[in-house]
Amino acid sequence: MYYTLAIKNLKSRKARSALTVAGIAIGIASLTLMLALSEGLKQAAFNNIGGNGALTQLTVQPKPEKGSLLKLLPVGGKQSISPQIAGQIGNLPHVAKIYPEMIFANISSLQVSIASSGMQTDTMIFGVPYEYISGDANVSKSDWEKATPPYPALVSKKILDIYNFTIAPTSGLPTVSEKDLSGVDVTLLPGESTFFPQTGKTTNPVTARIIGFSDKTSLVGVTIPLEAVRQMNVQRDPAYTDNYLRLHVQVDRAENVATVRDGINRLGLDAVSPLEEIKTISDNFLVVEIGLGLISLIILFVAGLMIANTFLSAVSERKHDIGLFRALGATRSDIRKLFLAEASVIGLIGGMTGIFIGAVGGLIINNLLLKALPEMSFKPDTLFIFNPLSLLFTLTLAIMLSTFFALIPAVTASRLNPLEALTKE
């Protein structure tokens, strides 16, 4: 009954009701868009982290030394993990597998020909076992572990982004895709740097062939078979003994990652899990979501004041109707419920309209922005994700706010004296 009368009253004041609904819709549309954008960016960040390794994987490396910038470069030496330590980690409970990563212990350079243009740049040379990159390597285990050049090589997907958006435009070189570089031979010059003074012995040039791109490989170098890097280190220093730059530790189950990490930390090493990165991003995005939500709530608060003003005016205009209802037996509670029913209908219509506007607007903005963004390895599939729970929350919020701001006018209307309300001025 209350909602039937509420809808009838709102229809009798279409212009004012439409303006009030519009105020709610604008606030809900902005909140819907902001929550969807935050969810989309957060999901894109999570996907990027997930591409770097499984959530049951830990990356283990020595604690960084304090000192100059050169000490921060991954060139082995003290900043390495011995096979003995790797063995201790392998014996920890819940450790399923260890994938060691070795590095050629000096800065090197790389020569490559792109579109008939030669280029040389500094690089690091990393080595990993086949099992670690088997999902990204388009070759068999025997081909990856072959003992003679050209060695199969993987490079980071983000290197293409750096080349296409920084090096190519400034050097007048053409942009390239993964397909363009797949199968291309490059020459590695171990120990020869174009930017830093030579700090050690050089070894013979090595040919490598790009076979694919991976998120698991380092951004600052080329990744080739582990044994190939070991041979380079022995050629540079015959007394070389195996040392690993880092270890990629596979844990049996996600719930055991923290236990394994603590065990590794007790050995004096740093262990980082994608789960920790995801938690950090979640915490950061929570702050962003709160900030964006506050902006939308301010808009909704202004719309709420409009609702309060609209219903206060309605109380004054509808005194005669209220007095008539009371004279016919309506209680104060009935009057309050009638006004609150009208407010909830406005909130429902405004909320649904706002969600629709936000969803359509988000789809339009999403398509325009994705078309404008250049093709990059970390380009998200979508910028807006409309979570059903978030949509339900915004709709509920619209109804609750509308009802809340109509509460004072509803109480005011219920306290009108029927006799005075029916008396003509």
Image (cartoon, rainbow, N blue to C red):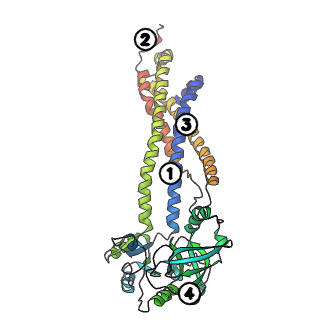
Q: Are marks 4 and 1 in contact (CB under 8 Å)?
A: no
Q: Find the distance from the CA under tag 3 to the CA under tag 1.
A: 20 Å
Answer few, some or many: residues within 10 Å of disc 1's Cα (few below 14, many 20 plus, some between 14 and 19).
many
**Residue hosting label 4:** 145
Q: Find the distance from the CA under tag 2 to the CA under tag 3.
A: 37 Å
Residue 217 in view, yes or no: no
Amino acid found under the numbered disc labelled 4: Glu
Residue 236: x and y in percent read 46, 88
Residue 181: x and y in percent read 64, 73
90 lies above or below 156? below
Q: Are marks 3 and 1 in contact (CB under 8 Å)?
A: no
In the image, what residue occupies the spot 55% across and 41% down?
29
Q: Which mark is residue 38?
A: 1
Q: Find the distance from the CA under tag 2 to the CA under tag 1.
A: 54 Å
Residue 105 in view, yes or no: yes
Comparing 7 with 103, the one in front is 103
Q: Find the distance from the CA under tag 4 to the CA under tag 3.
A: 62 Å
Answer few, some or many: residues within 10 Å of disc 2's Cα (few below 14, many 20 plus, some between 14 and 19).
few
Q: Which mark is residue 25?
A: 3
| Nearer the camera: disc 2 or disc 4 | 4
Mark toward the start of the polypeptide (2 vs 4) = 4
Amino acid found under the numbered disc labelled 3: Ala
Mark toward the start of the polypeptide (4 vs 3) = 3
Mark toward the start of the polypeptide (3 vs 1) = 3
Mark toward the start of the polypeptide (4 vs 1) = 1
Image quadrant where residue 98 sits: bottom left
Image quadrant where residue 256 sits: bottom left
Q: Find the distance from the CA under tag 2 to the CA under tag 4.
A: 97 Å
**Residue hosting label 2:** 420
Mark toward the start of the polypeptide (2 vs 3) = 3
| SS for dot 3 | helix
